[in-house]
Amino acid sequence: MNKKTKIKQVIKNLKEMFPEVQTQLNYNNPFELLVATILSAQCTDKQVNNVTKKLFQRFKTPYDFAEGSIEELESLIKQTGYFHNKAKNIKECAKTVIEKFNGNVPDNMDDLLTLRGVGRKTANVVLNVIFNKGGIVVDTHVLRISRRLGFTDKKDPNKVEFDLMEIIPKNECIDFSLRLIYFGRSICKAIKPKCNECNFFDICIYEKK
């Protein structure tokens, strides 16, 4: 079975398993989503949501983050890990959004990548959720499962993204990423995957299945 035939089967089955999907990060405006996604690096969405519940009561707009105390910001996001770097990134990101984009989160990849702390994964989350522009969000789940299913042999998330873009129809990109994340959390886990419950057992090439 070639990759394009296999991906059609995977997309079909994922739709049946997870018909309705959406980002698990809580936010009230585009910049809050950007901040939440930056905070999600090396942190679970659940933990990020616990932190942003209080954070977004204090800081709501790019102006709030740019003008606020970095010490206060650090204290509010400490539980997400790497809080010194994340606080610096978010503060500089807010300043750039104000200075270069009039306080508005940019709606294209090139501009988003000029923001401190924003890589392709974070940019794709914002583009997908806010602007409905198809892109593959390659997080740890998407990376792991794409390799196990034989869609890529790469380990670099950016290279995996481009491998997936070659075989996934553009109109499926947004929901495919989310469905694979749901699947990774519930079935195809990093440790002790539930292979006996997996619809893709026959096409999986994971050596430990």
Image: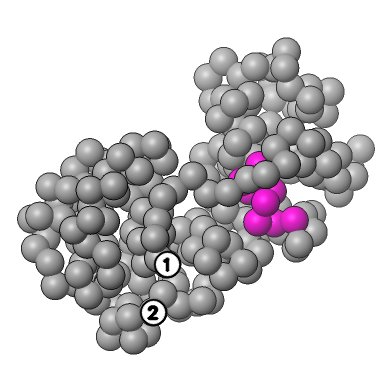
Q: Secondary structure at mark 1?
A: helix
Mark 1 → mark 2, Cα distance in angstroms: 8 Å
- Residue 20 spot, x, y in % from top left: 67, 44
Residue 186 within the segment the image draws in magenta: no
Question: Number of callouts in the render?
Answer: 2
Q: Residue furthest top?
A: 196
- Residue 203 spot, x, y in % from top left: 82, 28
Type of residue at label 2?
Answer: Asn
Tell me the crowding category of disc 1: few under 14, some 14 to 19, or many 20 or more residues within 10 angstroms, Cα based.
some
**Magenta residues, as a range?**
172-179
Vertical placement of residue 157 versus 205, above or below: below
- Residue 110 spot, x, y in % from top left: 50, 77
Q: Are marks 1 and 2 in contact (CB under 8 Å)?
A: yes
Q: Residue at x 62, y 67 (%)?
A: 132
Q: Which mark is residue 30?
A: 1
Q: Secondary structure at mark 2?
A: loop
Side (left or right) of 57 relative to 157: left
Q: Residue at x 36, y 53 (%)?
A: 36
- Near-viewer residue (65 or 81): 65
What kind of secondary structure does the magenta stretch mostly adopt? helix
The coloring applied to the image is one colour
Which quadrant: the N terminus?
A: top right
Type of residue at label 1?
Answer: Pro
Mark before the other along the chain sequence, 1 or 2: 1
- Near-viewer residue (165 or 52): 52
- Residue matched to label 2: 104
Quarter occupied by residue 147: top right
Asked if one can make out residue 72 in the rendered structure from this viewpoint, the answer is yes
